[in-house]
Structures are given as C-alpha cells and as structure tokens.
Image (cartoon, rainbow, N blue to C red):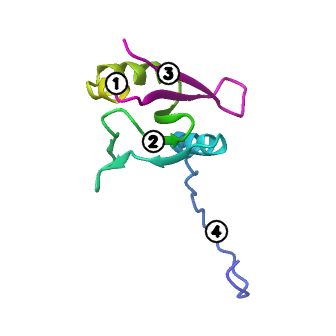
Amino acid sequence: YDGGLGREVNEVVKVKPKRKKPFAANREAVKILTEQGWTCSVVEQTIPHTFLKRDCFGFGDILAVSPSRGILMVQATGGGNGSTRAIKIRQEPRHAIWLAAGGRIQVWDFVKRAGQKERECKILEITKL
C-alpha cells in the first residue's frame, strides 16, 4: 500500500537470512573461570586489518591467575578440535618454558553434541613430556 493514494505496490523484497553467529569460546571460558574465582585476561590478539588471531606465546588465549591455584594459560576452542590444539601446543617450544616456570596449560574444548542445545566443556591439561 502506498500511503493512502489507493494504489497497491507489488514489490518483492528479498531478505537475506541472518547467519548464525560463531560460538564465542573465549567469552564462555572467561565466564566459567571467573565464576570459579580466577582473575582472567584475554591475551589473544587480533592483527589489525586482518581476520588473523595471534595467541600469547603461540598457544594461549586466556591468562588466569589465582593466589591459591597459581597461573593458568587456557586455549579455548569449539567444535571438537581440542586434540588438534593440544598437538599444536606440544609443538610450540615456548610451552615447555611456561610449564618449567610453574605455569599450567589447559585446552578447553566446547563441544555441541547432536540433539543438545548446550555445549559441554572438555578440559585437557597439558603436562611435561
């Protein structure tokens, strides 16, 4: 309808469907860590004008500290590729320095199972070889 002039406007407007937003693994991990009493900072960097991300020391997304539990570097991921991330961490020479200095490393893999709405978090601790 064109605003009261009595003419019908036959126009088809195609609306592009909204794409599903990717799962924010870092945000979810920080939320959980904070609830558990950790003090957290996202240390992953986005390289300006690109879609590239750079991890802290080549393997960490989130740095978490606690007076009673020490320091923890978390690699957060989604989609069931936690084992791939663990292999990547073990291939990074700086991970051994982090562990030798007393730091801990965990891979948090947020996996969505078929038929489930919520994701479950699988945690893999990286230890000395």
Residue at image location 50% in from the left, 41% down from the top: 64
Q: Is residue 115 above or below residue 58?
A: above
Checking the image for residue 100, the label placed there is 1
Residue type, numbered disc 3? Glu
Determine contact: label 2, label 3, CB under 8 Å. no
| Dot in front, 2 or 4 | 2
Checking the image for residue 125, the label placed there is 3
In the drawing, does residue 44 fall left or right of residue 112?
left
Specify start and end residues of the magenta stretch as a single range: 100-129
Residue type, numbered disc 1? Ala
Q: CA distance from mark 2 to mark 4?
A: 57 Å
| Dot in front, 1 or 4 | 1
Which numbered disc flags the more N-terminal residue, 3 or 4?
A: 4
Residue type, numbered disc 4? Asn
Secondary structure, mark 4, is loop
> Looking at this view, is 76 or 102 the one in front?
102
Pointer 4: what residue?
A: 10
Secondary structure, mark 3, is strand
Q: CA distance from mark 3 to mark 1?
A: 15 Å
For mark 1, does the 10 Å Cα neighbourhood hold few (<14), some (14 to 19), or many (20 or more) residues?
few
Q: Position of residue 82 (x, y in %)?
A: 48, 23
Residue type, numbered disc 2? Leu
Pointer 2: what residue?
A: 63
Q: CA distance from mark 1 to mark 4?
A: 71 Å
For mark 2, does the 10 Å Cα neighbourhood hold few (<14), some (14 to 19), or many (20 or more) residues?
many
